[in-house]
Structure formats: C-alpha cells, structure tokens
Image: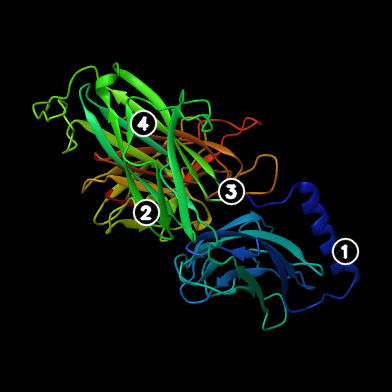
Amino acid sequence: MIASNLLPASRLRATVLVGLFSCAFTPLAHADIALDGTSTPTTYARGRINSFLLDLHVVSDAFAGVDALTFQLPPGVTLSAVRKRNTFTFCSDVHPLVDGMGTSDGGWYPLGWPALDGCGSFAGSPDPGEEQIVIVDLDVPAGYSGDLPLTVHALGDGNGDPPNEADLVLTLADEGAPTQPIVATASKLAVRAGSDVHSEQALAIGNDGAGTLNYMLSTTISDGITPPDCGTPVPLPWIALASTSGAVAAGARDDVAVTFDASVLSAGDHTAALCVASNDPAQPVRAIPLLFSVDATPCAAADRLFASGFDDDADGTCSHALRTFDARAAFLAAVAPGYEANTFTALRTGYVHGPLPFGSAYPYAVTAAPSYDIGDFSLFDGAGELSNVSAGDTSTLTIAFTGAPVTAVGGNVWGQMFQNPTSVEMNLQPPTTIRIELDDGTVETFVATSQQDFRGFASTRPIRTLTFSAPVADGDGNYLWSVFDNLVVGSAR
C-alpha cells in the first residue's frame, strides 16, 4: 500500500506560486513557528482507547515546516496510534517515522533524528497557517480522572528563527463515570449438541454502569434474520430458563442457566431470541439471537443416563457453545485471569513480510493474503494496528493459535481507507462490512462504523484460527482494508 499525502495539482501549484511571489517581491521573513488547532471530540472516556481528530495549523512567515510532530501525555496515559488524515508538505522525499507508541511521549520523527531534515514533514505558511489534520489515539486507564492535557509539540525544520519550536496544549474533559445502569451480556449464543442432549449454558447478565440493574428475561420466535419481536414473548419447549428476572449491582454479574433440549427437536438448525428487558436507558430491550444446531445422531458418549432419561452433558462432551460479544467489557468478564492483550504499538512503519509472531502464554501468528514481493502487511505510518498491503474481496488477515488452547479471543475490528482515490484525505473509517470466520465454520458478519467496534468470542472448545476480511465494496466500487487492534487472547471462564 503506497500512501500519498500530496495535495491536488491545482492547490499545490497555487501554494507554490504564492511562495514564489512572496520571495520575488517581498523581503524573506524569518519567523518562529507557531501552532494552533482544535480537537474533535473534546472529551475522553475512561478505561478505553479514545480517538481524536486534531485540526492543526502550522504558522510560519518563512514557510518553515515541522520536522517532528510529537505528543506528550500525563503519566499512565499512552499513545496507541497516530495517523495522518489530511497533511501537506512541500517536500516529496520526506518520510517521517513513527516512534513512542505505547508510551506517553511519541509521534512523527524525521529520518536521521535528532538531526533536522531541513524540509519539514508538515508544511507551514503565514497566518492562518497551513492546515495539517492528524488522528491521535490515546489509551486512557480506567483509574484516570479529571482534565487530560494533550501537548502537541512542533519542532521546526530550521528554516525559521531559533528556537523554531512551538507547543499547543489541548485540554480534554473527563466524561466521568456512568450514572445509570448499563446491561452487559453476550450479543449471540450458539450451541451444538447431539440429538439426545440437554445442554445447560450459563449466560451472564452484568451491570457495567451505576446503581442497580433490574432485568427480566423471556424468549420469542426468530428466523435468525429479521429482528425479533421482544414485545411478544413466546415460550419455547426446547429452551428453559433457570430464572426470568434479577437485580445486579454495579460491577457485578448474574449467571443465568439456559438449558437447550435437543430431544424435542429434529436434526438441523433452530433459531430463537432471548429478550433482556432492563432499566438501562440506552438499551431498555436487548435481543440475543440463539442458534441451536442439533446433530442427526445421539452423542457418542451417551451412556451416562440420569433420572431424567437424558444425557445432561455435565462434562461438556456432548455439546459445544460459542458466545459472541460486541462490547469489550462484557467480553472481558467472560475471560479467565491470565489473558494477554496486544495493542501492536511495537510494530515498525512500512511493509513487512509475515507471518508475524505474537504472544507468550498464548502464542499466535498472523498472516496476510495476498502476498507481495514488498511484503504481506502494510504497517501504515507506524499505526498500532494490523492491516494487509492491499484491499479487495480476497484480501484477508488470519490469526492462527500455535500454543496453549485458546477459548477466548476478541478485539477491535473495522474497515479503514488508508488511501482515498477521490480525495487527499486518508485513514477514513466509513461504514464497512466486516467478515470474521472461525475454523469451525462460524461466520460473524457486521457493519463496522469506527475503530471502537468490537467482536469477541468465548468458546467451550479451542479456537484455532480467525480470518478477517472486508469483502464488500463501497458505493463507489472501492474496497477498504480490514483492520484489527487491541487483541485479547486467553481462556473462557
């Protein structure tokens, strides 16, 4: 993937002509660099990675540029990624590198740093300055509170008067802790069992907000495609709930036993929905799709008959369950202690050949397809995320687990337009159809709208591979890159 940050020819010619006109008819000014700008949004959320669009203006009467654009943060808050959205330089041979990701001080640096390049990676111009739009991702711990100062530091290329540096402090306000209950649970539950099995699965209903979460559970019919009508509860003979209501304190969870009875069903796939009604003001009713796949034959281990006359699958031999999550907090509650998390901030800029190895207690390797002579992956601008070289309907990223059994894996997944064929803007994140396929044939498809979109899986059997893709073109026929980041790997509780 070859990125370009040049302006359209018309704007480039106009800018250069202005510079030449100034040189020919006015004395050349030598002024220090100034920096101005704003952030969108202006607030942050605790305990997650926050993304900020910085609209910066580099002001210099001498048309001095910025060699190094860096960001400083309070202790405990770290940089997760920096990306260019719409930037401009007069120099076509400038290739800044990203460093300091995963720390509180980092950004773009010129080759040969700390020596100055002499032609800045980010151009400056007289007031109101040259617009440089960048994206900065900050990892804010859950324990941080209060205002968060983000210091943007510009080090000039030497074409202005010393010290040729400027700072801009953007103050990000704390969104604060939740004040209302927030329901946290799986977004899907799929179970496969032999034809004679009673399979009992625990479904966690959690409260990631404040106060007490009061909830009620019911079932209803669903075809697995059309949104179910939770306003019309329908008892189903093959689903039994151990309880249908409860109250959960902030930070706590209830485990509700859901029993699937294969003995009353024919072989094949059966769908329904579990409806969670609660006092969560953001989602007062949540429908959880249920998929029960019944095998045509009894369980091979069905010699353990109990008083009910059925195999109760107490050891999990005769059934398999997969929970899907669309919220990170709910997923982490389903993961046992000792999991590993990777923000991929140690990756270098540029093209890289795979497979890339990661992990310690839960090792895995990531491969990308198709492969090219220049590399399999494009670690664009050093951003702390994994993506492949090209976008297309056959472009994929695959994680293969190579060590200890993995039964829980999740991360942020989205589509990104690293290059825009119709605009100078880069790193756009438009709505993108994402496809994730597990080695057992399970396919999760959804439309991601930002890098905050999350998918996680907790399984009763090992997950061996996951493959990510963005196989659907946008309205203009352009494909986007499938990207994943902030990966959590471990064991399900």
The answer to whether the residue labelled 3 contacts the one labelled 4, judged by CB atoms less than 8 Å apart, is no
The x and y percentages for residue 134 are: 63, 59
Helix, strand or loop under label 1: helix
Instruction: Report crowding for label 4: few under 14, some 14 to 19, many 20 or more residues within 10 A (C-alpha).
Output: few
Report the disc number at residue 21: 1
Q: CA distance from mark 1 to mark 3?
A: 30 Å
Q: Nearer the viewer, mark 4 or mark 1?
A: 4
Q: Is residue 488 left or right of residue 305?
A: right
Q: Is residue 265 left or right of residue 137?
A: left
Q: Nearer the viewer, residue 315 or 128?
A: 315
Instruction: Report crowding for label 3: few under 14, some 14 to 19, many 20 or more residues within 10 A (C-alpha).
Output: few
Q: Earlier in the sequence, mark 4 or mark 1?
A: 1
Instruction: Report crowding for label 2: few under 14, some 14 to 19, many 20 or more residues within 10 A (C-alpha).
Output: many
Which residue type carries mark 3?
A: Ala
Q: CA distance from mark 4 to mark 1?
A: 63 Å
Q: Earlier in the sequence, mark 3 or mark 4?
A: 3
Residue at (53% x, 75% y) in the render:
114
Is residue 350 among what the camera can see?
no
Q: Which residue is mark 2?
A: 253
Q: Which residue is mark 4?
A: 442
Q: Earlier in the sequence, mark 4 or mark 2?
A: 2
Q: Earlier in the sequence, mark 2 or mark 1?
A: 1
Which residue type carries mark 1?
A: Phe
Which residue type carries mark 4?
A: Thr
Q: Nearer the viewer, residue 186 or 55?
A: 186
